[in-house]
Image: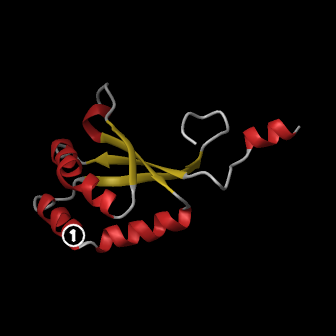
Amino acid sequence: MLGFSALSGPNPSHHVYELRMYHVNAGKMGTLKARFGDYTDAIFKRHNMKSVGYWVPEDAPSSQNLFIYMLEHPSREEAKKNWDAFHDDPEWKKVKAESEVEGPLVEHIDNYFMDSTGYSALK
């Protein structure tokens, strides 16, 4: 029974993962991808936000309007602290404003905090 419990529940000594799915406004995918590649990922690193990966679906229509990425955080509390610092970052504010001169890049964001399972490659 002990083995089953270890596999089924979250382990507080491990990191928490944040899955973010951006529903991108029409015609804005290229600009969003460039913003992440040129600026956002570096700003994440500066605020202790570890990028696990970035993805775009292969098949249309999602390939045109869905941008997915995952971050790793030491805890939910650290995630909140780091997101607050990120949003207050002067470079981020400037980059966001400049990239959205012709309108917002993202319609809405789906966001999930996740715990890895005991048999996950990511712990």
Q: Position of residue 20 (x, y in %)?
A: 41, 49
* Residue sitting nearer the eye, 54 or 15: 15
Q: Position of residue 27 (x, y in %)?
A: 16, 43
* Residue sitting nearer the eye, 91 or 101: 91
Residue marked by disc 1: 93
Left or right of 55: which side holds 28? left
* Residue sitting nearer the eye, 48 or 116: 48
* Residue sitting nearer the eye, 108 or 40: 40
Q: Residue at x 55, y 62 (%)?
A: 76
Residue 108 against residue 80 in the figure, above or below? above
Q: Amino acid at mark 1?
A: Lys
Image quadrant for the N terminus?
top right
Q: Position of residue 46 (x, y in %)?
A: 31, 62
Residue 84 against residue 19 in the figure, above or below? below
Left or right of 76: which side holds 70? left
Q: Residue at x 39, y 61 (%)?
A: 48
